[in-house]
Image (cartoon, rainbow, N blue to C red):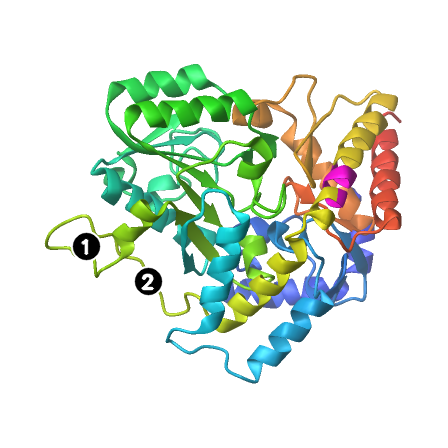
Amino acid sequence: MQMFEKYFVKTSKSKALYERAKKVLPAGVSYGIRYFEPYPFYVSKAKGSKLYDVDGNKYVDFWMGHGTHILGHCPPNVVEAVKKQISNGTHFGASHELEVELAEQVVRMVPSAEMVRFTNSGTEANMYAVRLARAYTGRSKIIKFEGGWHGGYDALHIGVKLPFNIPESAGITVGATQDTILASFNNLDDVEAKARKEPIAAIIVEPVLGAGGCIPAEKEFLKGLRELCDSKGALLIYDEVITGFRIAPGGAQQHYGIVPDMTVFGKILGGGFPVGAFCGRKEIMEHLNPLVYDHHSGGYAFHGGTFCANPITMTAGLATLKTLEDGKIIKDLNQKGEKVREKLTEIFEANNVDAQNTGLGSMFTTHFTKKEVKNARDTFAADRKRLMEYHLSLIQSGVFFLPTHFGSISAAHTEVDIDKLFSETENYAKSLTK
C-alpha cells in the first residue's frame, strides 16, 4: 500500500464516503468500472477540464465523463440553453419540436442518417439497432468483434475481454448469445470466413475500439466490411457512441469515407445528459413505423421508452451539435490528439519503456508492450498491471484517467493541462528506471 500513501493523505473525506457507499451501493459505486484501488475519490463539482473532489483536490480530467464532454464540463452555451428549457418543462411524455430539431441536425451532419430515433443510452440504442436489423433482413445472426463494447445488451455482452467466449455477466443465457458470432478486429479474412457459414443480419463494429484498447479500424478493413455486407444482403452497423461527432462532424464514417447502413450514437449527442440514438436509411428505419408495419403482418420492430427524446437532453444535444457542426473545434482537437500520442511515445522511448500509444482524433491510450497493437488480443497481451499503475500514479498527481481506460481531449483543455499530462508521465517513466 506504499504507492497509495500520498492518495490516503489527500482523500480522507473520499475514504469516509466510500465506507458509507459500500453499505448501500455494491462495490460502493454505481457502475463497476468506476471502482479503483484503494477507493475512488468522490467528485463535488466539475468545470471546464477539471474535476474537484470532496477533499478540495483538483484533477485535470482526461476521462471527461466516459468521453461525453467534448466541449468540457458545463460549457456556458449548453448550460444557458438547459436553464431556459428547464423553466418550460423537463419531461413531457408527448411529442415536441426539440426532438424534430435534433433529428434534423443529426440528418444534416451524419452521412448514413435519413431518419433517427432517440433512446436514453448507448446500450438501448445498440439493442434496438440489432433488433431492427433482424426485422429488416429476416435473419438472426450478428457478427461483432472481440474487444467491441456495445453496452449491457445480452446479445452483444460477449467477446469484450479475455476469455472472449465467456459473457461479461452471469445471468446471460446461452440462447441470448447463440446468434452472436465473434470475429477478430482488423482481420477481414476472419470475418469473411465467419460470414460464409450462414446468413447474417448485420455486422456491428466500433470504427475505433473503445474498451478494446482505443484501436482505430484500418480503412481497408471497413471497406471490406462494407463490400461483404453488400454482397451478403446484410446491414453494416457502426457503433459511434464514442466516435460520433468527435472524429469529424459526421463521425468516423465521414472521416473514413465509408458509410454504414445504420449508426448508433450516445455520449456527445446528449450534451452531457443521458442519451442514445440510432439512425439509418429510410427504408430500414420505416420498420419502426406502426403505420406501415405491425406485429401481425411482420416486419415491425418496436422501440420506445419513457424518457426517449426528453426535452432537456434534446436541448443540450442541439446546442452541442450546432457548436461542433462547422468542424473547427474538432479539427483543433484532432491535431492536439495527434500531438499527445506522439509526445507520450517520445517520453516512454526516451526512458526505455516499451509502450505503444493508440487512438484516433482526440482519443488516446497507452499499451505497455513492444508489439504493434491492432486488435483486442494485442491489448490484453500488453502489461495491464503497469497501465493500472501508470493511471493510479497520474491520479495521485492530479491527472485523471479512469484506470486502464482511454483518454480524450476536450475544447476546455489548455496547453498547461496537456503539459501536466506530459510532465507527470515523464515522472512515472523515470520512476520505472530507478
Of label 2 and label 1, which has the lower sequence position?
1
Residues in magenta, as a range = 332-337
x 57%, y 27%: residue: 380
Residue flagged by tag 2: what amino acid is it? Gly
Quadrant assignment, res 139? top left
x 50%, y 82%: residue: 89
* SS of the residue under disc 1: loop
x 70%, y 46%: residue: 330
Q: Residue 210, position in %: x, y?
A: 56, 38
Q: Residue 305, position in %: x, y?
A: 35, 65
The residue lying toward the viewer, choosing from 140 and 430, is 140
Q: Nearer the viewer, mark 2 or mark 1?
A: 1
Q: Residue 311, position in %: x, y?
A: 49, 72
As drawn, 343 above or below 398: above
x 59%, y 30%: residue: 216
Q: Residue 22, position in %: x, y?
A: 56, 62
Q: Is residue 375 visible?
A: yes
- Res. 314 mark: none
Q: Is residue 432 visible?
A: no
- Res. 293 mark: 1
* SS of the residue under disc 2: loop
339 left or right of 279 in image: right
Residue flagged by tag 1: what amino acid is it? Tyr
- Inspect the magenta stretch and tell me whether residue 334 lies in it: yes
Q: Main secondary structure of the magenta part?
A: helix
As drawn, 82 above or below 34: below
- Res. 304 mark: 2
96 left or right of 268 in image: left
